[in-house]
Image (cartoon, helix red, strand yellow):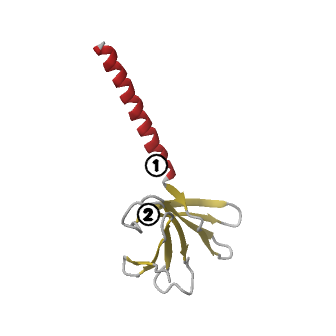
Amino acid sequence: MDRTSSACWAAVLLLVTLATIARADELKADEFRLSHSHGISCSRGLAPGKLNTATCRSFTYLFNVRTSEYFRCEVGLSLTRDNKEVINVQTDGACTRRPRIFETDGNYDFDVAETTPPNTNSFFGSGGYSAWAADTKTRKVRGCITIASGLGSDVSKCLDMTFR
């Protein structure tokens, strides 16, 4: 009886553990959302009878809806050709972690807008971006603006919105 009882408890414990792990994996898969804000900028270097280069960069944001942490993701492609053929194609890209917008976990929504070079509003390097996050369960909105300082580090400030 003891072995049967122990085996049953072990089976129940195993099932509960597996269900918990499955639920945790399901939650992790649902925590990130890709922003609907993205952009692309391209430039071209033209020289008659010489090599021509076209470069395009695109960005988007990946947002954790539970923690309000987000990542800025960028991809680039550079193509070099002469008058007859493509000589070289190079790509690069990565996602850079940005700080949390809210200090506590919740259920958040997110949007972002970004300046892209060349832009007459970009006084310091490539410009900046604004990020907006809102708690979907309560009336809570925070707006953040980040500007490249041109001195190696970005300047970023967030402000909680008041409702009048």
Viewer-proximal residue among 85 and 96: 96
Quarter of the figure with residue 69: bottom left
Asked if 121 appears above or below 31 in the picture, the reply is below
Q: Is residue 146 left or right of residue 58?
A: left
Which residue shows up at 71% across the image and 63% down it?
84
Q: Label 1 vs label 2: CA separation? A: 14 Å
Q: Residue placed at 42% from the left, 39% from the top?
A: 21
Residue 28's label in the rendered image is 1
Q: Is mark 1 on a helix, strand or loop?
A: helix
**Residue nearest the observer in this picture, 56 or 149:** 149
Could you tell me how many numbered marks the image carries?
2
**Image quadrant in which the N terminus is located:** top left
Is there CB contact under 8 Å for labels 1 and 2? no
Please report the residue visible at 42 percent of the width from the left and 69 percent of the height from the top.
101
Which is nearer the N-term, disc 1 or disc 2?
1
**Circle 2: is it few (<14), some (14-19), or many (20+) Cα within 10 Å?**
many
Going by the numbered disc 1, the residue's amino acid type is Lys
- Tell which residue pokes out farthest to the top in this image: 1
The vertical placement of 90 against 6, above or below, is below
* Type of amino acid at the residue the image marks with label 2: Ser
Percent position (x, y) of residue 97?
Answer: 41, 63
Q: Element at badge 2?
A: loop
Query: Which residue corresponds to mark 2?
Result: 68
Report crowding for label 1: few under 14, some 14 to 19, many 20 or more residues within 10 A (C-alpha): few
The percent position of residue 42, horizontal first and vertical second, equals 62, 72
Q: Where is residue 29 in the image (x, y as percent from the top left)?
A: 50, 48
* Snapshot quadrant of residue 118: bottom right
